[in-house]
Image: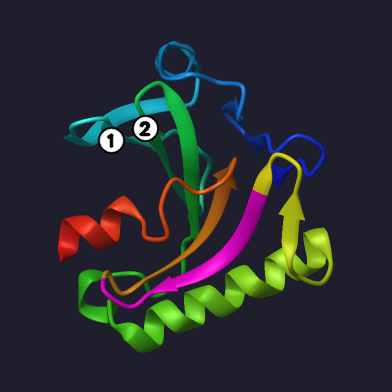
Amino acid sequence: MKIHVNDGTVEFATGSIGPAVDRNAFLQSSVAGKQSYVNGPFALYAIQTEAGIGATAQFYGDRLEVIFVWFSMPDDSDDNWNEAHERLRMKVHDEWLQIELGEPPYRFAWGRIESVFDAKGCEGEIHVSYGEPRTSSSWRDRKKS
């Protein structure tokens, strides 16, 4: 996987996706996976990536808002899913981003890249976000409230 900081394109072994891709183009691409969630204008789709990496694309209407990425860990299992394990995953993400992109913050004209720990969902992820945030909270926070 590679994140191109010049335009925000995320490149996987199976293909790439970036801010210029609308929902229809994504659904016809080589990286499009199954739809996993729809609520009004929000839609979430799995992304076909490569071994050791998981990813999801979040659309609001036709606009790609966020790509969520996470690295697999050697001991990933439902039995090991806990805060300590996910914080360790976040540390792996932080280290990878620092090697690939240098010191944070990672803010660009097209958007931003962040290593995030979502306490409500107990998930460590990399967020590649496009444009200005619509609101101060994500749809995931509103969904889980």
The numbered mark at residue 130 is none
Q: How many marks?
A: 2
Q: Along the line of sight, which residue is nearer the eye, 18 or 31?
A: 18
Say above or below: 79 vs 129: below
Q: Residue at x 26, y 30 (%)?
A: 41
Circle 1 — which element?
strand
Q: Is residue 112 shown left or right of residue 136? A: right
The numbered mark at residue 42 is 1
Q: Is residue 109 shown left or right of residue 33? A: right
Residue reaching furthest to the bottom: 84
> Where residue 118 appears, x then y in whole percent?
37, 71
Q: Residue at x 35, y 25 (%)?
A: 61
Say above or below: 70 vs 74: above
Look at the image and tell me whether residue 1 can be seen: no
Q: Along the line of sight, which residue is nearer the eye, 66 or 92?
A: 66
- Any magenta on residue 10? no
- Amino acid type at image mark 2: Tyr
- Amino acid type at image mark 1: Phe
Circle 2 — which element?
strand
* Residue range (magenta): 112-120
The residue where tag 2 is placed is 60
Say above or below: 16 vs 144: above
Say above or below: 2 vs 75: above
Tag 1–tag 2 contact (CB < 8 Å): yes
- State the image quarter where residue 81 is shown: bottom left
Q: Quadrant of the N terminus?
A: top right
> Where residue 86 appears, x then y in whole percent?
40, 77
- Any magenta on residue 114? yes
